[in-house]
Amino acid sequence: MKFFIQSRNDDLSNKLMEDAKMYLVDFGLTFDEEKPDIVLSIGGDGTLLHAFHKYKHLTSSVAFVGIHTGHLGFYADWKPVEIEKLVISIAKKEYDVIEYPLLEVTINYRHEEDSSVYLAVNESTVKSPDVTLVMDVELNGMHFERFRGDGLCMSTPSGSTAYNKALGGAIVHPSLEAMQLAEIASINNRVFRTVGAPLVLPKHHSCLLKPVKGPDFMVTVDHLQLLHKDVHSIMYRVANEKIRFARFRSFPFWQRVHDSFIDSDLKE
């Protein structure tokens, strides 16, 4: 089996990276940055997002596992003191692979035939360099609304606990192949109206954003911030590809939600 390790690059993460690499090589695994079978992410959820985008072309073959060196994350659930236990489980292949939906983002341009296509683990947002974003929103080819506001956010189920939650979106279980559109500070008055609520769209639906005001937009894809010029439209779909996680023990999604947002280390 081939492996790679992505570190957050702080002292603790780098020390764990070196220890894990030494242990895994001793167990007969091969360090391979080009085409690993499993990627260990040591740091936080952001570190795992960086690891995914490094290997997004290997979605069908690579699996990810996270070790957190800060706060417990949704994608990084192993503790530093468990590194030896994790390494042994990897060496013995004592894990199952689970898959979470991804978001496909396609940006089409007004004067170019080529499009830019991205995959997002958490979400993609669209904002205007101007004060107000004005976009026509089409659902399955039907005009739904003209949005005016700060921006729009399309999230995956696993990303529904991130920026989407801060925007008042629903938390969606990642077993559901769906995507969720949430508004960022929409303008609603007697003249301008939006639905004013997040929309959860199933896999077979599409969402097309068409610019009404201005051709240039700031588009984020997870941690990536990209300025796209001369945009004709932005298409969102649930991707055919999925992100694969190596799961060594049961850690239910709702338990993760509870531990992240409700539970506390301070017990009464």
Image (cartoon, rainbow, N blue to C red):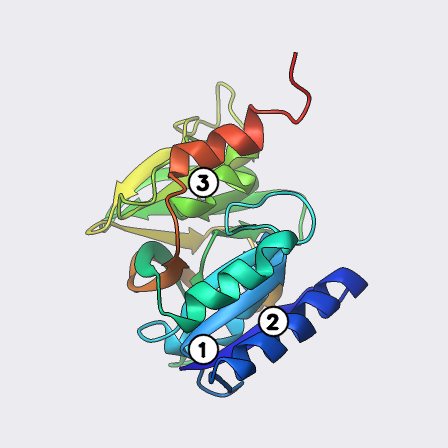
Left or right: residue 139 versus residue 147 is: left
Res 107 seen here: no
On the image, the x and y values in percent for residue 64 come to: 45, 65
Q: Residue at x 49, y 71 (%)?
A: 39
Q: Looking at the image, which is closer to me, 181 or 79?
A: 79
Mark identifier at residue 131: none
Which quarter of the figure is the N terminus placed in?
bottom left
Mark 3 element type: helix
N-term mark: 1 or 3: 1
Q: Amino acid at mark 3?
A: Ser
Q: Specify the quadrant of the image occupied by residue 111.
A: bottom left
Q: Nearer the viewer, residue 223 or 43?
A: 43
Q: Amino acid at mark 2?
A: Ala
SS under mark 2? helix
Tell me the amino acid under the disc marked 1. Answer: His
Residue 216's quadrant in the figure? bottom right
Q: Position of residue 91 (x, y in %)?
A: 43, 73
